[in-house]
């Protein structure tokens, strides 16, 4: 029985992105989360006594130059070398643009495949590792023609950094289809690039392991690497947990809560349950309150107080932090007829919000505010024109709800 460990998209020293990181206790705890995840990968390789570590691209993150990153990486590879564990690495799009990639002299147990491709036998085992690296930052064409045919009579494993036929949120790199991979004759495709784990096929195995450490709320939940077991020429796979920090979107239905006291009790119970079921060392929550609640306007009015309340509950667990509190409550008995001045003003705001002239003014003001932000933050908030319009509409709706909540709760 022979084991190998497959990972990709480590993005070493990539910063986690969350408003919750303004908390110095959390920031200090997670600033090295990608290093912690990679250390766990090496720990697992040693504990499982694997015959090799497969890294399918994007070991590094961007063009940042860091001697400390290089020193950390070399130390981890040395741990594997001391245990006689080889590393097989291909370069992805982030590796190709990173200065460290070509400057660090890696230990002799690390084999980096070139852009021309190649194949290496795994020690004395009848297993061959194939791989093709990116030659530059972009790979608009398929890399499959660069792979040599699989070795007859052996187990053949191929490393490829690819977006496959495309995935939301990921640029197109080295495009190919699952059918094309299946027709190549390899026994296991060790993929990389898409940050969500997915097993595309089992005959042959076509596995995207996902990133070992999520970096923002768009990469939620626990993350892992993939352990291959080769026995009698057959391959089986399992997950090995790696992430130190999870991003968790949590929706809490508060319909059963009669008042604020019951709401606090319910939220504390939900937060404690999140802590008890956590697979990583820590988590950053995005809480969304839903359901009917009789005093929803008061909650809307006092949203800052409630945000501090749930943040305190999370910190009490010692492993949870709240990034954002979203309030999407409704009246428990549905919309009610309200002829008060507040209701009339609320209806007027809703009507004005849909007028083209008002919408254009909001978008213009938003553009002015965004112009003061760094370019990368602007790109994240408004990747296209439609996103700018949607953000303006969302801000106008949220503002109208908040003003209405302040007026409805003013007498209490």
Image (cartoon, rainbow, N blue to C red):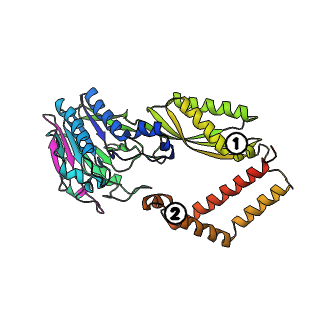
The residue that disc 1 covers is 291
SS class, disc 1: strand
Which residue: 75% across, 35% down?
A: 259
**Gap between marks 1 and 2, in whole Å?**
33 Å
> In which quadrant will I find the C terminus?
top right
In this rendering, position of residue 29 left or right of residue 364: left
Instruction: In this rendered view, identify the residue nearer to me: 234 or 129.
Output: 129
The quadrant holding residue 388 is bottom right
Instruction: In this rendered view, identify the residue nearer to me: 63 or 230.
Output: 63
Q: Is residue 355 magenta?
A: no
> In which quadrant will I find the N terminus?
top left
Magenta residues: mostly which secondary structure? loop
Residue 134 in the image, given as x and y percentages of width and height: 24, 56
Q: Is residue 41 visible?
A: yes
Instruction: In this rendered view, identify the residue nearer to me: 391 or 321.
Output: 321
Magenta region, residue range: 115-144
Residue 358 in the image, given as x and y percentages of width and height: 67, 69
Residue 71 in the image, given as x and y percentages of width and height: 23, 41
């Amino acid at each position: 029985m022979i084991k190998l460990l497959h990972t990709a998209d480590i993005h070493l020293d990539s910063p986690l992105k969350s408003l919750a990181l303004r908390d110095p206790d959390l920031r200090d705890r997670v600033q090295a989360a990608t290093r912690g995840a990679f250390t766990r990968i090496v720990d697992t390789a040693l504990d499982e006594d694997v015959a090799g570590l497969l890294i399918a691209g994007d070991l590094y993150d961007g063009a940042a130059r860091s001697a400390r990153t290089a020193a950390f990486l070399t130390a981890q590879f040395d741990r594997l070398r001391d245990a006689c564990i080889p590393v097989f690495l291909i370069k992805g799009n982030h590796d190709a643009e990173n200065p460290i990639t070509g400057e660090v002299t890696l230990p002799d147990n690390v084999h980096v495949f070139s852009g021309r491709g190649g194949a290496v036998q795994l020690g004395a085992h009848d297993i061959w590792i194939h791989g093709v690296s990116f030659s530059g930052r972009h790979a608009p064409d398929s890399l499959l023609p660069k792979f040599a045919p699989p070795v007859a009579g052996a187990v053949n494993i191929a490393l490829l950094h690819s977006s496959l036929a495309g995935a939301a949120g990921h640029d197109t790199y080295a495009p190919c289809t699952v059918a094309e991979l299946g027709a190549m004759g390899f026994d296991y495709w060790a993929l990389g690039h898409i940050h969500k784990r997915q097993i595309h096929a089992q005959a042959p195995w076509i596995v995207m392991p996902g990133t070992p450490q999520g970096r923002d709320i768009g990469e939620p939940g626990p993350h892992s690497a993939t352990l291959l077991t080769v026995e009698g020429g057959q391959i089986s796979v399992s997950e090995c947990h790696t992430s130190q920090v999870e991003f968790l979107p949590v929706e809490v239905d508060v319909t059963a809560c009669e008042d604020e006291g019951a709401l606090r009790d319910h939220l504390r119970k939900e937060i404690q349950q999140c802590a008890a079921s956590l697979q990583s060392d820590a988590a950053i929550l995005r809480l969304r309150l839903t359901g009917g609640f009789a005093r929803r306007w008061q909650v809307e009015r006092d949203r800052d107080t409630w945000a501090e309340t749930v943040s305190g509950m999370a910190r009490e667990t010692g492993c949870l932090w709240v990034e954002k509190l979203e309030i999407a409550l409704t009246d428990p008995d549905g919309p009610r007829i309200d002829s008060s001045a507040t209701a009339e003003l609320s209806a007027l705001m809703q009507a004005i919000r849909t007028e083209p002239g008002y919408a254009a003014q909001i978008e213009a003001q938003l553009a002015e505010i965004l112009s003061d932000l760094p370019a990368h933050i602007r790109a994240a908030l408004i990747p296209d024109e439609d996103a700018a319009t949607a953000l303006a509409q969302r801000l106008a709706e949220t503002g109208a709800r908040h003003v209405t909540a302040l007026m409805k709760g003013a007498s209490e």
